[in-house]
C-alpha cells in the first residue's frame, strides 16, 4: 500500500472538512448550520469559520472564486439586511448577533443570547473574506463595503455594560449576562476586533482589565498561560498570527501566544500520557481535550465501572471535566504550533479510530472507554466549528494564508496595537 | 425544636448557666470585653492571665457562633456525612458496599450535641471564673466613653474590646420570611432530616452544608447568583467543587437568583430565574448562607464615640483601635475575614495594643482559611488576580493531586496544590490547595510565608513518604528544576566531564 505523505493526508482531511460548509449552508441567505443534526439552527460562529474557509477552498482549487464569492456575499447581504433591534426575534442588536439563528428566517432561536465572542468570530470571518476578495469593483467591492458597514455598526463599548471587561452576552428579556470573561480564553480575537473599531471601540484599558485575570503556571514542567480546553489555545490563532508579537503580559513572561499554544499542546499530550483517570486510548499520540460533544449526562456502565459522562462540555486538562472523550480535530488544529506531535496524533487516531472519521470527516469527538462492537463511541453527525478550525489551522500550517490575509487587515493591526501588542510582523 | 438531652444541659451549664448571678462590679476594670465568642474569650483569658482585672459581657451564650452554631457543630456533622459518603464509595476501595446504608440523622445530631457539650467546657463560665474574669450576662450598652451598662449596673473601664461577632445576613426574598428558613443559628437544632433541601448561597457555609446534607440523604439543590461557587476562590478550585457536587447528585444552579418563595400544602415552592429562564423547585426546607453582618444591635456605640457601619462593622485602624482611643475591636465585628482563627488572632493583637502599648498591625497577619467541603479548599496570601492588580508579577507552580502518590493510594485525587511566587524569585505570595485535607496542608505554606522561607528551601525539607503534603515538596522540586537554565546545565555538564576525566586518571 502506498504511503500517504503528510501533505496528501492533510489535504484530504482539510478538503473533507471544507465539504461541511457548502453542504450545511442555506444558499438563500448564506446561513450555516451549527451541526448536521436534524433541526440544527445556524451558529453565527460557524458562519465566521465558513467565510474564512471559502478563500482556502479557492486557493486549493476545490471551488472557483465566483462560487466562493457568491456564497460569502449571500451571507453578508443577509446580515446587512436582517433586523437589528431590541425585538426578541430580531437577528441582532447594536451590531451584534444572536448566537443561534433560524436557518430559514435568520431570526433569533433557542432564546439564545446576543453573543459578543460569537459575533467576533463571525466578523473575523467577514474580515477574512474582505481581505481575500480584493478586486476592484463589482461584487468583490460590494462585499468589502458590506463588511466595513457591518463592522462599523458594532457598538463594542456598549458590550462592556459599564464594566471594565466585555460582557459575555445580552438578552432582550434580562439584559447583560451578569458575568464577564475571567481567565485566559478564546477572547483575544474579540478584544482585538473590539479595540480596532473606528466607531465604537472598547475602552482602552479593557484589554488590560481582562488580562489581569490571567494565570501563568508551571504544570508538568511547562510554563504557560493556563487554560484547560485546547480550543482556547487555537480559536484566536485561526485568524491572528501571534508569532513574535507580544502584549504586556507576554513581554513580562518573555513568551508569545503562539509559543504558549505550543506549550499548551505539550501539556495536553503529557496529560494524556499520564492519563490520571485511566481512560482507554489515551497516550502521547492520542490526546485532545476540548469543548466538544460527549456521550451524555447520564451514568452508563463502562469497563465494569460506573463513570459519569458529559454531553457537550468544555473538557480540559488537568482539572477536567474529563470523561475519556477526545477530539481528533483538536489535536490536528495544533499543527501550526507543534507540527510533528500533531501529525503523529492525526495518523495514530485515524489508524486506531477510523469510526470517528466517517466519510473522511472528523467527528466532534470519540470515546474509546465507551466502546461497543462498532468501536469507540462516536459523536453523531458533524459540528461546523470543528470543521472550520480544521480547514483554517491546516491552511495556516501549510501556507499561512489566513494569517497573511489578516496581517494586512487595518482593523486587526489597530486592535492589536491598541491592546498593547508590538514586535514581530506588527 | 432544640432537644433537651443531657448534652444540651451540660453545654448550657457551661455557656449559660440557668442559675447565675452577675458579680458585683469592681469600681473600675482594666479591660471590659463585650462579647464572649472566640475573640472575646481569647481577650478575656489572655488579659486576665497577665493580671488585668477583666469583665466579660455576653448577652447570649459563651463560645459564640463557633462553639454553638458554627465551626464545631458544622464540622462534626460534616465528619458524619463524610463517613456515609465513604460507605457508599466502599466498592471503589475494594470493599463490598455495606448492605442497606440507612442514615440515622437523629443519631448524627446526638453525636453533634455530645461533642459540642464536651468542647463547651473550654469556653465555660467556670473556667472564666477560675481565671479571675468577672462574667456578666446581659445586653451590654455603652453609656459614655468609658462606661458600659449591663444588667442594671455600670462597668467603668480603662480599656474595652468590642467582640460581639456577626449574625447571618438573611436575603430579602419575597415570601422567604413567611415560609421560614434555616441559617447556621438553627440548622443544628434540626431533629429530622429535610427530605428536600434548597441551599441559597454558594459561599463556604452554603457549600459545606449543601454537601453534608446531601450526603446525609437530603435531595439537595444549591442556588448561586454567580457563575461559580466560592467567588473569592480560584476558578479551578470552584470548578472542581462544582464537578464534585454534580457527581454526588447535588442539583447545582449557578447564575441563578431566587425570586420568591410560597408555601403550598406544607411545601415550599421556590421560584428561580437564570437570565430569562424561570423554574420552580419544591422543597421541605430552605437554608440560607448568603454572608454575615456585624452584630452591633444594642451596643449604643454612639454613646462611646465609636463609629461603625452596618456592613463593614466597627471602624478600626490597623491597630484595631476604634474611633474611641479607649476602645478596641476584634473578630467578626470588625474583621474582613470572619473566621474563628482570625477572631483569635485579632483578639491577641487588640489585648497587646490596648493594654501593653503594642503596635502590632492587623494588616501584617498572614491569614489562611479553608472551606471544609470534600475536597477542601484552602488558601493563604494573595490570589494571582490580587497580585496582578497590584502590579506584582506572579508565577504559579501547580501540582495536580492525581500526580501525588498518596492521593492516588487514598483515592483522593481531586484537587491541586498551586503555589504563587513573585516572578523571578522563590518568595511565596500565596497558595491555594484543593485536596481532601487541604486545611491541614496549607499550614506548611503559611509557616513558610510567616517565616519568609522561600519555595526553594521547601525542596530541601524532608516530607515523609507517602503523604499528600508531599505535593508541596513536588511543587518546590518543580521550582528547583526551573533554576537549571541552559547555562547552568552547560556548566554542570562541563563539571561532570572534568570529574569523570580526573577520576579516570
Image (tube, helix red, strand yellow):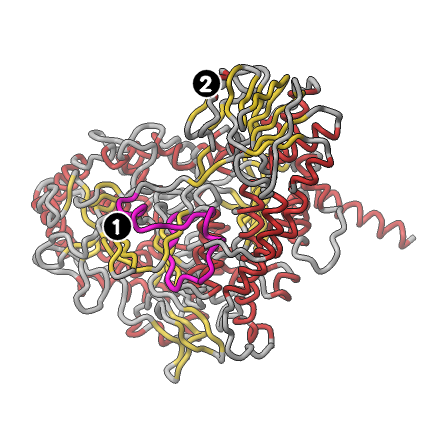
Query: How far from the left and from the top, in percent, is residue B331?
Result: 56, 33
Up the image or down, B282 lies above or below B377; here it is: below
Query: How far from the left and from the top, in percent, is residue A104?
Result: 9, 59
Determine whether, in the image, residue B279 is placed left or right of residue A142. Answer: right
User: In what quadrant of the picture does the N terminus of chain B appear?
Assistant: bottom left
Which residue is depicted at the point 58% across and 62% down?
B412
Contact between labelled residues 1 and 2, with CB atoms less than 8 Å apart: no
Query: How far from the left and from the top, in percent, is residue A305?
Result: 49, 76
- Can residue A272 be seen here? The reply is yes
Up the image or down, B280 lies above or below A295; here it is: above
Please tell me whether residue B178 belongs to the stretch shown in magenta. yes
Q: Quadrant of residue B128?
A: top right
* Residue beneath disc 1: B273
- Looking at this view, name the residue that lies furthest to the right: B505
- Can residue A221 be seen here? The reply is no
**Chief secondary structure of the magenta span?**
loop
Which residue is depicted at the point 19% across and 49% down?
A98
Which residue is depicted at the point 23% across and 60% down?
A34
Q: Which residues are magenta?
A: B173-202
Q: Nearer the viewer, residue B18 or B316?
A: B18
How many tags in the picture?
2
* Residue beneath disc 2: B302
> Dot 2 surroundings within 10 Å: few (below 14), some, or many (20 or more)?
few
Amino acid at each position: 500500500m502506498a504511503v500517504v505523505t503528510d501533505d496528501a493526508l492533510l489535504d484530504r482531511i482539510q478538503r473533507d472538512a471544507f465539504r461541511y460548509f457548502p453542504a450545511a449552508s442555506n444558499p438563500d441567505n448564506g446561513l450555516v448550520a451549527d451541526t448536521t443534526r436534524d433541526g440544527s439552527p445556524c451558529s453565527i460562529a460557524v458562519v465566521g469559520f465558513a467565510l474564512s474557509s471559502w478563500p482556502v477552498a479557492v486557493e486549493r482549487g476545490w471551488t472557483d472564486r465566483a462560487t466562493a464569492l457568491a456564497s460569502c456575499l449571500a451571507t453578508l447581504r443577509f446580515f446587512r439586511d436582517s433586523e437589528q433591534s431590541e425585538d426578541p426575534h430580531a437577528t441582532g442588536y447594536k451590531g451584534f448577533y444572536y448566537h443561534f439563528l433560524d436557518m430559514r428566517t435568520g431570526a433569533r432561536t433557542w432564546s439564545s443570547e446576543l453573543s459578543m465572542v460569537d459575533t467576533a468570530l463571525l466578523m473575523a470571518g467577514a474580515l477574512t473574506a474582505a481581505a481575500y476578495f480584493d478586486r476592484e469593483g463589482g461584487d468583490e467591492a460590494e462585499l468589502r463595503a458590506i463588511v466595513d458597514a457591518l463592522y462599523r455598526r458594532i457598538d463594542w463599548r456598549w458590550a462592556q455594560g459599564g464594566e471594565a471587561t466585555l460582557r459575555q452576552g445580552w438578552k432582550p428579556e434580562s439584559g447583560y449576562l451578569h458575568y464577564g470573561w475571567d481567565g485566559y480564553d478564546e477572547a483575544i480575537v474579540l478584544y482585538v476586533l473590539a479595540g480596532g473599531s473606528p466607531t465604537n471601540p472598547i475602552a482602552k484599558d479593557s484589554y488590560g482589565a481582562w488580562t489581569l485575570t490571567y494565570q501563568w503556571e508551571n504544570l508538568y514542567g511547562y510554563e504557560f498561560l493556563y487554560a484547560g480546553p485546547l480550543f482556547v489555545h487555537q480559536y484566536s490563532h485561526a485568524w491572528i498570527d501571534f508569532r513574535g508579537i507580544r502584549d504586556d503580559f507576554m513581554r513580562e513572561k518573555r513568551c508569545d501566544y503562539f509559543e504558549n499554544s505550543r506549550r499548551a499542546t505539550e501539556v495536553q499530550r503529557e496529560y494524556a500520557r499520564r492519563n490520571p483517570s485511566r481512560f482507554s486510548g489515551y497516550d502521547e499520540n492520542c490526546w485532545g481535550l476540548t469543548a466538544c460533544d460527549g456521550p451524555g449526562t447520564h451514568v452508563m456502565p463502562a469497563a465494569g465501572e460506573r463513570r459519569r459522562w458529559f454531553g457537550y462540555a468544555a473538557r480540559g486538562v488537568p482539572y477536567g471535566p474529563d470523561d475519556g472523550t477526545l477530539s481528533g480535530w483538536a489535536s490536528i488544529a495544533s499543527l501550526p504550533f507543534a507540527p510533528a506531535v500533531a501529525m503523529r496524533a492525526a495518523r495514530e487516531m485515524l489508524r486506531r479510530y477510523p469510526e470517528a472519521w466517517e466519510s473522511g470527516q472528523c467527528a466532534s469527538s470519540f470515546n474509546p472507554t465507551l466502546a461497543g462492537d462498532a468501536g469507540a463511541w462516536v459523536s453523531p453527525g458533524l459540528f461546523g466549528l470543528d470543521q472550520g478550525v480544521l480547514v483554517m489551522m491546516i491552511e495556516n500550517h501549510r501556507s499561512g494564508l489566513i494569517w497573511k490575509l489578516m496581517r494586512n487587515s487595518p482593523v486587526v493591526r489597530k486592535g492589536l496595537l491598541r491592546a498593547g501588542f508590538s514586535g514581530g510582523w506588527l | 425544636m432544640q432537644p433537651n438531652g443531657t448534652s444540651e444541659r451540660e453545654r448550657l451549664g457551661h455557656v449559660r448557666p440557668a442559675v447565675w448571678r452577675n458579680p458585683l462590679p469592681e469600681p473600675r476594670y482594666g479591660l471590659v470585653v463585650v462579647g464572649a465568642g472566640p475573640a472575646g474569650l481569647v481577650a478575656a483569658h489572655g488579659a486576665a492571665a497577665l493580671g488585668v482585672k477583666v469583665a466579660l459581657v455576653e448577652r447570649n451564650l459563651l463560645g459564640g457562633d463557633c462553639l454553638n452554631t458554627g465551626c464545631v457543630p458544622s464540622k462534626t456533622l460534616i465528619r458524619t456525612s463524610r463517613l456515609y459518603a465513604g460507605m457508599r464509595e466502599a466498592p471503589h476501595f475494594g470493599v463490598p458496599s455495606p448492605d442497606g446504608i440507612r442514615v440515622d440523622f437523629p443519631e448524627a445530631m446526638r453525636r453533634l450535641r455530645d461533642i459540642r457539650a464536651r468542647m463547651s467546657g473550654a469556653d465555660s463560665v467556670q473556667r472564666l471564673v477560675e481565671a479571675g474574669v468577672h462574667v456578666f450576662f446581659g445586653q451590654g450598652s455603652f453609656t459614655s466613653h468609658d462606661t458600659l451598662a449591663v444588667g442594671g449596673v455600670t462597668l467603668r473601664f480603662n480599656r474595652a474590646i468590642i467582640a460581639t461577632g456577626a449574625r447571618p445576613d438573611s436575603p430579602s426574598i419575597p415570601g422567604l420570611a413567611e415560609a421560614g428558613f434555616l441559617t447556621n443559628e438553627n440548622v443544628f437544632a434540626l431533629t429530622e432530616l429535610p427530605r428536600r433541601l434548597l441551599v441559597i448561597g454558594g459561599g463556604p457555609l452554603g457549600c459545606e452544608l449543601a454537601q453534608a446534607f446531601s450526603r446525609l440523604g437530603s435531595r439537595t439543590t444549591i442556588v448561586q447568583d454567580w457563575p461559580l461557587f466560592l467567588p473569592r476562590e480560584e476558578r479551578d478550585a470552584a470548578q472542581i467543587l462544582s464537578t464534585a457536587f454534580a457527581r454526588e447528585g447535588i442539583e447545582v444552579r449557578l447564575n441563578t437568583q431566587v425570586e420568591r418563595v410560597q408555601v403550598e400544602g406544607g411545601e415550599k415552592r421556590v421560584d428561580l430565574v437564570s437570565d430569562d429562564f424561570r423554574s420552580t423547585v419544591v422543597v421541605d426546607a430552605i437554608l440560607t448562607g448568603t454572608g454575615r453582618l456585624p452584630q452591633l444591635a444594642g451596643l449604643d456605640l454612639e454613646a462611646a464615640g465609636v463609629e461603625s457601619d452596618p456592613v463593614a462593622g466597627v471602624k478600626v485602624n490597623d491597630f484595631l483601635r476604634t474611633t474611641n482611643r479607649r476602645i478596641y475591636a476584634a473578630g467578626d465585628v470588625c474583621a474582613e475575614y470572619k473566621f474563628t482563627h482570625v477572631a483569635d488572632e485579632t483578639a491577641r493583637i487588640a489585648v497587646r495594643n490596648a493594654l501593653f502599648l503594642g503596635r502590632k498591625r492587623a494588616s501584617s497577619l498572614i491569614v489562611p482559611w479553608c472551606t471544609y467541603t470534600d475536597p477542601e479548599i484552602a488558601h493563604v496570601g494573595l490570589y494571582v488576580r490580587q497580585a496582578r492588580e497590584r502590579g506584582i508579577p506572579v508565577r504559579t507552580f501547580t501540582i495536580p493531586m492525581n500526580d501525588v502518590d498518596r492521593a492516588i493510594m487514598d483515592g483522593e485525587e481531586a484537587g491541586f496544590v498551586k503555589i504563587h511566587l513573585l516572578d523571578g524569585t522563590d518568595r511565596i505570595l500565596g497558595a491555594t490547595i484543593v485536596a481532601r485535607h487541604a486545611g491541614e496542608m496549607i499550614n506548611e505554606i503559611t509557616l513558610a510565608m510567616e517565616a519568609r522561607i522561600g519555595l526553594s528551601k521547601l525542596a530541601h525539607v524532608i516530607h515523609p513518604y507517602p503523604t499528600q503534603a508531599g505535593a508541596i515538596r513536588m511543587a518546590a522540586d518543580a521550582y528547583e528544576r526551573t533554576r537549571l537554565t541552559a547555562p547552568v546545565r552547560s556548566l554542570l555538564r562541563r563539571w561532570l566531564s572534568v570529574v569523570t576525566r580526573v577520576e579516570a586518571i
